[in-house]
Image (cartoon, helix red, strand yellow):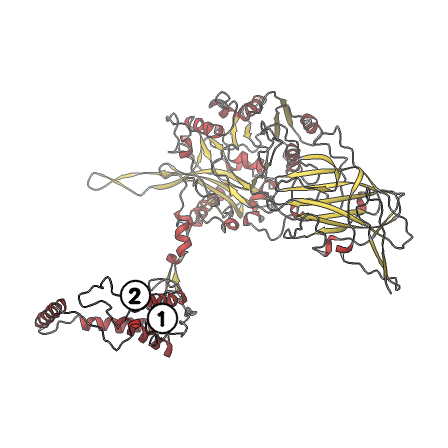
Amino acid sequence: MCAFSVRKTNLARWLIASLLTVCSTDTFVFAALSLLALLYLQYKGQANLHVFEDWCGSSTADLRKNMHYPLYPHSRITVQKLAVSPQWTNYGLRIFGYLHPFADGDLVFALSSDDNSEFWLSTDESPHNLQLLAWVGKTGREWTAPGEFEKYASQTSKPVRLSSQRRYFFEVIHKQNDKGTDHVEVAVSRYYMQISSPVFNDLRFHPTDESGLLMNDVAHIPQTVASHQQPPVRQNTATADMLREDPRDTLYHVPFINNKLLQGVLPDCSYKPSYIIKDFPLLRYQGLQFVHMSYIYPNDYTRLTHMETENSCYYFDSPHYMKLFGFSRYMRLDRSDTHEKARGILYSKIKEDRKPEKSTVGKQQRLVGREVELAATKSFTTSRRDANIPLGRLNQKEINRRKSLRDKEIERNMPLQLEGENRIGGDKIIVKGNNAKKWQQEFKDQNEEETDVHSEDGRRGDDERDPFWGEDRDLEGDEEDTTPAPVFDTEVNWSQTFQVNHMDLQLQRSDWIDLRCNISGNLLLHPSDAQPMVKAFMDKLNQKHRGRFTLVRVVNVVKRVDGIQGSRYLLELQLKDVDGKLLRLSHYIYALIRHSRQRSKGFGFQRQQPQLVLCNPVGFRWNPIATVHFIVPVKNQARWVQQLITDMELLFRETGDSNFNLIITDYNSTDMDVRRALHKSSLPRYQYVKLSGNFERSAGLQAGVDLITDDHSIVFLCDLHIHFPLSIVDTIRKHCVEGYMAFAPIVMRLDCGATPLDAKGFWEVNGFGLLGIYKSDLEAVGGMNTREFKDRWGGEDWELLDRIFQAGLEVERIYLRNFFHHFHSKRGMWNRRVSSDHR
């Protein structure tokens, strides 16, 4: 037999007492949580609260995807109560501290939140012994109302025995999306093992002291099983094809072929592309019109196919047309044999009807005369009502009303059909059976029925009363048809086949940058164009070196189209020499278009077809050991600055390339010591300059450029919130040629809550702020415009693009794999201020 006891304690410390149910068999029977007396944790002391803003998602798993979690929150404060509701959206919370009970006993913890949350408690004061006691959901679809602790079984923990001689580390994790009433609260009840068990008088909490620490001081933050820094793991089945492994991504590991072996393979030629517009007068921002895309082989899968469910701009049809007709115009339906026979019979019938008939003119004359005679008769006679027919059935208005309702009912039950013979689902509905004949006959009878309710002179007198609306109207003969209208189902032709041609949409694309579509990706070079170039070059290479090299793989081919002078190619190949050593070839060649004339027999000149001549463009050569300077202006962005330093350290460890330099221009940041963070890092080279005043991007970039002493090194004007592929330094070098070409890669902007390992977003086709250019070329065009773009940023990249084109340089523009711009809001950034009233 079971018994229970409810015991009240001091209401100042305990809101309600708890419930204990003990069975004689020593088996605990947990009473319904609605009967448990819950107490919000009101305590002496404080707990740490870390806030992670601007992060979408509803589950705690989404919060753990945040690259700043758990070490670099936006805010670090303390709270005095475990019932928090910031009344904000798209954020995550981490609350932690130490719980110290005053007396021994058992506690039951409960959790409530919108959206998901977790409550963890350690078996002692060590953060490494945490155990998950209660949680609200795991998928992000679960939520509760404030104070609702009975919705899910997982919200309530089992009894936990705590000792007054120890303190216990606890942690609460909460994730809120952009909907609902945000809240998270923890409650506790006393669970008595025996009636005589001691009673808790209070709970005391201790936070971790974070006063006086900067945002990049993270050694004190507990690392637990609930919140620990997990290294990112690339999934085997990536959601985006671009995230799959590609030989381009690791080509930097392969050693270069000796450059001397490439000399003399092709004849030298001057490089003078026709699209250079040196000294051409441009209007402000007109240089954007002279940007052309390069073609890529093989497919690098930069087309964001996984985002086309929301954006189908890759296809040329308008969204309205696609919504109505889909891809029906790309296919032609096959006609069935019965359909072809029916068409043949119909065609024969039409031919017979078109045969000239004898005395046709005479028949037509007699027919016209008869119609004129009938018309003359009708115009002078008046129809009369049959007195035997009830008046209610002769009311034409009522007949038309019923007929209209009937037609609408039938029309509502008819399936929607598409016009045309070759449209999908375009077959007409065939109604079979007696019901069809019945309804057809009924409609025919109703259409042929004619009545007249007017008097002989066509008018009703003022004193004349309509018998239909009077008391004496006779409706006995008006029988309402209660037969339900037929319901028609669409007949599906499951055996329908169709004809289709190969649809190569790449052939319809041009090298003009498409500013309307941000998912399309790189232009693809057809194999019939790339492979002959590779074969021709390999033949020349082995001809000079007597078959020393074998082609292992075509890693990458980049073509810059010029239909007048000739196209430029970047060949990136993996070769194997006679010793079996794997080598890398990354070399520019020029397919020069040569026009020749020959004297004909008539003493004239005959122009022949132009010929392509492979040659080596003199001067157009990239430097594989050039130093790349990444210049990043910052102000009060500690978590992002620390992430940038961490990413650069990883780049150095993985590639071993020390020929890059990180330059940070700091507008007097107060949330971290940037110079100290750089000094503690493992970067091979870095430079730091401290600036004063408001944040100015152009001035900050120019201050970094002024620190560079080597004019023959590459400047990469950069942003703070960038995720770089490991091949970024090598890629920048390949596409920057001093005196000839700058490089403006297209970055992918990640959506809120997306990560580089789960890339969802769009290509930033309009932005040119990420630019690689040799310092000598940048100084030749005048550097950054710090005069016009002094107190603002935005547009300075397009203005610089104008001057680059006017200086006679070209700009290489491609979509770059694994090159991401992290999502972030502008709240609290740079020169923005935070308003205290947000509601």
Q: Secondary structure at mark 1?
A: loop
Q: Mark 1 belongs to which amino acid?
A: Ser
> Which of the 4 quarters of the picture holds residue 471?
bottom left
**Horizontal placement of 368 versus 191: left or right?**
left
> Which of the 4 quarters of the picture holds residue 128?
top right
Q: Is residue 417 visible?
A: yes
How many residues crowd mark 1 within 10 Å: few (<14), some (14–19), many (20+)?
A: few
> Which of the 4 quarters of the picture holds residue 599?
top left
Depth check: give the residue in front, 308 or 103: 103
Image height check: is 253 above or below 486? above
Instruction: Give the residue pinned by disc 2.
Output: 397
Marks 2 and 1, how far apart at CA: 47 Å
Q: Position of residue 661 (x, y in %)?
A: 61, 29
Residue found at the very far front of the displayed protein: 463
Instruction: Give the residue pinned by disc 1.
Output: 336
**Horizontal placement of 25 versus 648: left or right?**
right
Q: Mark 2 belongs to which amino acid?
A: Lys
Q: Position of residue 790 (x, y in %)?
A: 52, 22
Of the numbered discs 2 and 1, the one sitting upstream in the chain is 1
